[in-house]
Amino acid sequence: MRFSKTLRYRLTAWYCFALAVVLFSFGVLLYGLVHYHLLHHHDEPLRAGAGSIIKILAEQDDCHDLTPHQIEELGKIGKLALIHEDQGARNVFYKSPELADGPLEPHLTKLPLKGGGSPQFETVLMEGIPWRVLSLPYQSRAGRNGVVRVVEDMGDIQETLEALRLGLLILAPVGILISALAGYWLSGKALAPVGRITALAQDIEANNLDQRLPHPGVDSEIGRLVDTLNRMFARLNTSFEAMKRFTADASHELRSPLATMQNTIDVIRERPRTVEEHQVTLLNIGRDVTRLSTIVEDLLLLARADAGRLAMKMEPVRLDWILESQVEAHQAQAKSSGIDLRISVSGAALILGDERWLHQLLVNLLGNALKFTPGGGQVSAALIMVGDKIRMTIEDSGPGIREEDLEKVFERFFRSDPSRSRNSTPGSGLGLAITAWIAEAHGASIQASNRPEGGAVFTVLFPPHPQVP
């Protein structure tokens, strides 16, 4: 049962079935054509003989009494019978010697005539022997109606057709059997690389996704399959490595505040504390709980985004208004840190987006810029139309980003050199990952770079609203 389910078996079975249908159709067509041509091979001689008989009968007015010359001429033609009506009865008034006392003569007398005055061909089977009969109506000059019947033995045709049938019945199964064996061998040879690929693919597991299948060296279906599988393994390896890093980083980020809270609780339990000390301890625990909640919320947000469960309400919004609102909201934080927060907007910027998530994007970018900018520094937010895009930039005068980290800052849990931060709480490393997701959901591109004079620049290119000329 398992063998019948293999692709090799099914290919061979379908090949044999198709070949059997072709051979059967070809055999029927060949047999029909041979039968037709052999059958009608006698028609022209019979037609010529009938014409000669009519000419012989026309030598006198009435054909009832044939002259010796007519009998002699009729004897040269072959097997024939002349039938005419005599007082309403059909009688044979001449028959060739070959038909004398034969079983065919009575049948020729009774054989009906169809088709009016046109020649009629038919095949008559007598004692297992087929006869080809031509019936040709005639009328003598005296007005006597009759029928000329010329016959030909087709026993040689029967033998030829029987030999052809036997040959087809023997050769067709033998041909199908040979084709089945050859097809099974060829399909096995063609599918052998698939078997090797399957065996190698089964050996590739989660811990060795960096392995690749060997290419057969030819640009065939198998070669393209190997290329596709290798690209799939590469994507799986990349995703698996990213998942492992994500899991490790998430575990680390969650473990740190939990360890801090556990240490704090252990210290409290060592000896009695004053009310003020308990308040300070609870305040520290509260900060760790807030940090844990933020990390968990960000993780849940990214998980729902990856699953496609976060639907955005896209509608025309003014990006310049959102930028001005967020800059205004961050002014108090900037002043408390001694940072000059500026904004530059060239005009109205209408895009298609979700206002809530666009606010979150700016909260992350502005908060990130203020966090890494030292006191006395500057953060600039700008919005300008460049070509067919709306360019929004957030610049800071902090230490900038290492060149090797520019392509990594949007990865989850990634944090650049801790010295870039001006405080001891650099964050969880999820803010910029969320920012990149929001930009992508709006059809925008985001890029990180450094200013020549120092500091980081985050550039977001938005497509304008379709109705904007």
Image (cartoon, helix red, strand yellow):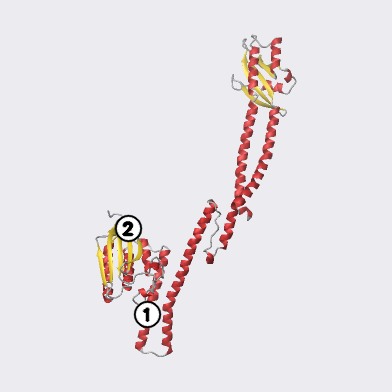
Which residue corresponds to the image point at 36% horizontal and 87% vertical from the top-left? 277
x and y, in percent, of residue 126 in the image: 71, 27
Mark 1 touches mark 2? (CB < 8 Å): no
Q: Residues within 10 Å of mark 1 (few under 14, many from 20)?
A: few
In the image, residue 90 above or below residue 296: above
Instruction: Tell me the SS state at disc 2.
Output: loop
- 26 lies left or right of 395: right
x and y, in percent, of residue 37 in the image: 63, 28
Q: Nearer the viewer, residue 361 or 227?
A: 227
Which residue corresponds to the image point at 59% horizontal and 59% vertical from the top-left? 199
- 246 lies left or right of 173: left
Spatial CA span between label 1 and label 2: 42 Å
Which residue position holds label 2? 463
- Residue 23 is drawn in which quadrant? top right
- Residue 43 is drawn in which quadrant? top right
- 255 lies left or right of 118: left
Q: Residue furthest left?
A: 347
Q: Compare marks 1 and 2 and give the one earlier in the sequence.
A: 1
The label nearer to you, 1 versus 2, is: 2
Q: Amino acid at mark 1?
A: Gly
Which residue position holds label 1? 286
Location of the N terminus (image quadrant): bottom right
Instruction: Tell me the SS state at disc 1.
Output: helix
- 84 lies left or right of 300: right
Q: Amino acid at mark 2?
A: Pro
x and y, in percent, of residue 436 in the image: 37, 64
Q: Residues within 10 Å of mark 2 (few under 14, many from 20)?
A: some
Q: Residue furthest front?
A: 452
The answer to whether residue 255 shows anywhere in this view is yes
The answer to whether residue 409 shows anywhere in this view is no
